[in-house]
Structure formats: structure tokens, C-alpha cells
Amino acid sequence: MSSGTPSRIRLALEYGVLFFGLPVVFVLDRFPLPLFPSLWLLAAGCLIWLLRSPEFSARRLWSLGSLNGHLLKALAPVVAGVPLILVATWVLLPERLFGFVRERPAMWALVMVLYPLLSVLPQGVVYRVFIFRRYRRLFPARGARIAASAAAFSAVHIVFENWIAPAFTLAGGALFAWTYDRSQSELPAAVQHALFGCTIFTVGLGWYFYAGAVR
């Protein structure tokens, strides 16, 4: 191990603090910044680290060419999952079904546009690209990296103080990480993430996934 390479112990501590410690700090109302500015700041720091990595290619990461051969595979779980989310909402929470669309259509349309840009893209940088590359020595097996990504993605959603957000994002995080690992590009995973996220907001489950649900 070179002098500039962090030890596995240091990487484990860093991973634990960043992805499990910080969400707890948020829940305890001890973090000085709101959630989304904090996400953007973290994503900026992760992106700076990635850009300084000699093996990282930002052009390849978000290249439209990365969709070739991977787009249909990325869309298949969406086609299967969206009807399940719709039916589950209709059966379990019928009063919320399409509530956002019906009650605040202009805000819903704005979320459909801004959510992929302001939430999905920075989350992809942090919870997939950065984790896979930064902690490769800590999680050398493919399955371990996918699990580490999904666990961190789920853990940050405890800030919404309900069980639905972490549960949904644990499953989603595993799927998105698997797609990223298979394609070696964030774009197919981001497409999945955006489509599932927009579906959740549309059917009426978005209440569990934004800061307004915390208080």
C-alpha cells in the first residue's frame, strides 16, 4: 500500500461517518445546512475527487453511447415495477393516489423537470460512482459494492423519519447500483432512478420522500 493510499480501517471509518453518521446528525437537527444544499455540496466534493482520479472518465460516465445495449435492460425493471407501485398505492393508500397531480399540478410538473437534475444526478455521483470507486479496496467483491451502495442510499432516507422511504430506496438502490455496475456508466442507472422517482411522486407517495414529510 502506497503512502497516499488510505488504509481499509480509514476507508471503513470514512464510509461509516459519511453515509451513516451524517444522516443521524440530520435526524437530530444538528447539521447546519438544509438537506438539498448538503447533498449538492457532498456531490461537488465527490465529483472533485473523481475528476482527480486518473482512471475516471466523466465523458464516458454520462455518454449517451452508454445507453447502447443497456437502455432496454434498464427500462425492463421500470416497466415491471411501475404497475406494482401504482397498485400498491391504490390498495394501501387510496387517499393519496395521484393526490400530488390533482392538488398541485403546476408543482408536480416542476418536480418532474427538476427532480432528475437536482436530485438524481447528484445522488448518482455520491451513492454510485463515488462509492464504487472510492471504496473498491474496502468492498472488492461486486456484490459487496452493490450492497454498500444500496445501504448508504437507503440510510440517507432516514432523514424523512418514516420507514417507507428507507425500505423503498434499499430495493431501488440495489437495482440502480447493479445497473451502474453492469453498464459501467451512470446514465442508465440515472434513467432508472429518475423514472422510479417520478413515478413515486406521481402516484402520491412523494410525501414520504421530501423534507415536508419530516415535520
Image: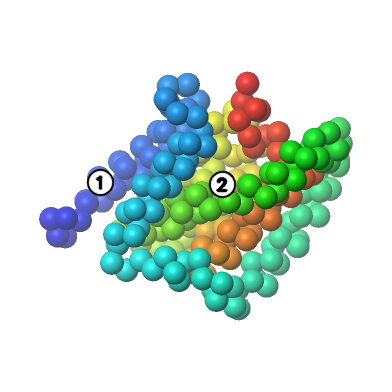
Give the left or right position of residue 46, taking residue 172 as reference. left
Q: Which residue is mark 2?
A: 118
Q: Amino acid at mark 2?
A: Leu
SS for dot 2: helix
Point 76% across, 55% down: residue: 82
Give the left or right position of residue 181, taking residue 79 as reference. left
Q: Amino acid at mark 1?
A: Ile
Q: Which residue is mark 1?
A: 9
Point 29% across, 48% down: residue: 11
Foreground: 71 or 103? 103
SS for dot 1: helix
Instruction: Check the picture and name the quadrant holding the C terminus.
Output: top right
For the question of whether residue 138 can be seen, the reply is: no
Where is residue 167, by image quadrant? Answer: top right
Q: Residue furthest bottom?
A: 69
Q: Residue furthest left?
A: 3
